[in-house]
Amino acid sequence: MEPVPNATVYIVDDDADVREALAWLLRSRRLLSESYDSAEAFEAMLASHSPSRTPCCLLLDVRMGGKSGLTLFDDLKAQDQIGRMPVIFLTGHADVPTAVDTVKRGAFDFCEKPFSDNGLVDRIEQALAVSAQWLEAAAQQETVRTRLSELTERERAVMGLVVEGVPNKLIADQLDISVRTVEVHRARVFDKMQVKSAVELANLLRAHGQLPAA
């Protein structure tokens, strides 16, 4: 797998030796990392920064002093963070059943201590690729929302009927405007949404959950 550029691996573990070993492993694979000794310290960092717009993932210890890794995971999930920042749990043998449950609830994976360096890095790279895909999809969705916000109320009305496959003549009748005016609005919608056909427009809106209500 090709390395994901500009990616960051966050390490949250209360064991300094584990943090250093993981940071060294990641440096040896040319992966950037940031380490935190508690869930609270990591949350403080997140609170002081805007959400990352570059790929990232989180290596998270299950058991720590203070807030546990499981509680941090639940908090991140409630904040819709684990899409852009997949979580890989680092667990002891006794924690495996719990870690398996968290995977069912949305964690990316878990690695049992002592873990295989190669196996862990492989999963980290896969998690970073998922993060990159999520960020790209989020950016595309934001682009579509921005384009939609530039439509006038009349253009939105015309667009809704266009994607339903209603002919221009019937659109004109329903909106009590001329066919020529419909054609003008239709062309402006296509231009603003950067599409060339009604099918392309409908597919774009459907892909991003933006199809207007019937």
Image (spheres, rainbow, N blue to C red):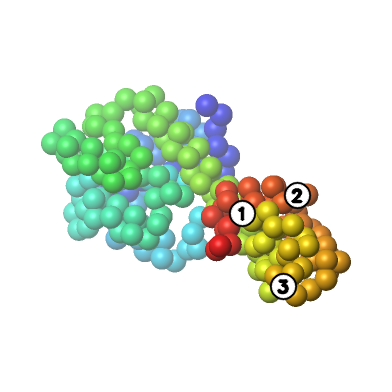
Asked if disc 1 and disc 2 are in contact, CB closer than 8 Å, the reply is no
Regarding mark 2 in the picture, which secondary structure is present there? loop
Circle 2 Cα neighbour tier, 10 Å, few/some/many (<14 / 14–19 / ≥20): some
- Residue at image position (51%, 55%) is 52
Q: In the rendered image, which quarter is residue 95 located in? A: top left
Q: Residue 122 location in percent, x, y?
A: 42, 28
- Mark drawn on residue 85: none
Marking on residue 175: 3
In terms of secondary structure, where does tag 3 sit?
A: helix
C-alpha gap between disc 2 and disc 3: 21 Å
Tell me the CA gap for discs 1 and 2. 12 Å
**Where residue 35 appears, x then y in whole percent?**
38, 48
User: What residue type is disc 1 on?
Assistant: Leu
Report if the CB atoms under discs 2 and 3 are less than 8 Å apart.
Answer: no
- Find residue 145 and report its horizontal and vertical position in percent: 61, 62
Disc 1 secondary structure class: helix
Mark 2 or 3: the one toward you: 3
Q: Which amino acid does the dot numbered 2 rest on?
A: Ser
Q: Which residue is mark 1?
A: 205
Q: Is residue 17 visible?
A: no
The residue tagged 2 is 197
| Tag 3 and tag 1, C-beta contact below 8 Å | no
Disc 3: CA contacts within 10 A as few (<14), some (14-19) or many (>=20)? few
Front residue (pair 94, 108): 108
Q: Where does the C terminus fall, quadrant-wise?
A: bottom right
Sequence-first disc among 1 and 2: 2
Q: Looking at the picture, does residue 193 appear above or below residue 17?
A: below
Q: Of the residues shown, which amino acid type is indicated by label 3?
A: Leu
Residue beneath the point at 58% across and 57% down: 211
**Left or right: 25 in relation to 95:** right
Which badge, 2 or 3, comes first in the chain's sequence? 3
Horizontal and vertical percent for residue 203? Answer: 63, 47
